[in-house]
Amino acid sequence: MSIPVISLDTDWHQAQNCSLPSELAPWILEPASLTARLKRHCGHFRVQVLNEQRTALPVFLQPLLPNTLQAQLREVILWCDDKPCVYGQSWLPEKTVNALRPLADMGERPLGDYIFQQSGLQRGSIEVTQLQLTLPDAGSALCYTRRSVFRLNDLPLLVAEAFLPAMAELKAFA
Ligand SMILES: C=C(O[C@@H]1C=C(C(=O)O)C=C[C@H]1O)C(=O)O
């Protein structure tokens, strides 16, 4: 089994039970598309795909994506202008990708631009943790990270997003 660039196997907490830094809280709690919010804060938005592969679902994710043996792992960095702002790690179960074929080949199109256009999208609760991340082009830092399970026509997928230090350089957080 290929190992993801970043392991998110750690303790997660419901966001409403966490004290969050005031400037990041609106981002961590954002229920709509993070892509759309980032696009409102920069002139040029870009998705850098670090890794996209079909792999076995790690054991620590099985409670979130039950009955899922294989999934498509997608790891990206979301860039605002010349700033690496978010590391995204998504797990798309095989049954979800087979039913929603665009998910199989997103490439540099942001996942959010697709899933938030689908009617019947449901988002589960937002969990939060802090992770020491070391990323190409972004160095190493302790980053607030969130994750939630989405359902599209009851087909699940998990999206995790780590907020990188460059978030502090975005125009006024709003
Ligand atoms: C779920 C979203 O999609 C974003 C885009 C991602 C991608 O292209 O892999 C990953 C994480 C998200 O920040 C969103 O915009 O909220």
Image (cartoon, helix red, strand yellow):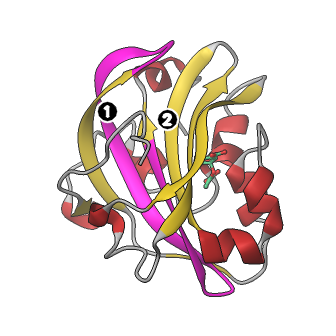
Residue at x 61%, y 87% (from the top left corner): 154
Q: Where is mark 2, residue-wise?
A: 87
Residue 40 located left or right of residue 90: right
Q: In the rendered image of this protein, does residue 144 appear above or below residue 169? A: below
Residue farthest bottom in this picture: 154
Mark 2 in CB contact with mark 1 (< 8 angstroms): yes
For the residue pair 3 and 30, the one nearer the viewer reads as 3
Residue 85 in the image: state x and y as whole percent. Answer: 53, 27
Image quadrant of residue 48? top right
Instruction: Give the CA distance from mark 2 to mark 1.
Output: 10 Å
Is label 2 in a helix, a strand or a loop? strand
- Count of numbered marks: 2
Residue 52's label in the rendered image is none
- Residue type at mark 2 is Tyr
Residue 143's label in the rendered image is 1
Residue 119 located left or right of residue 157: right
Bounds of the magenta segment: 135-161
Quarter in which the C terminus is drawn: top right
- Residue type at mark 1 is Cys
Q: Which of marks 2 and 1 is nearer the N terminus?
A: 2
Q: In the rendered image of this protein, does residue 7 appear above or below residue 30? A: above
Q: Is the magenta stretch mostly helix, strand or loop?
A: strand
Q: In the rendered image of this protein, does residue 25 appear above or below residue 151? A: above
Residue at x 47%, y 19% (from the top left corner): 166
Residue 136 in the image: state x and y as whole percent. Answer: 48, 16
Is label 1 in a helix, a strand or a loop? strand
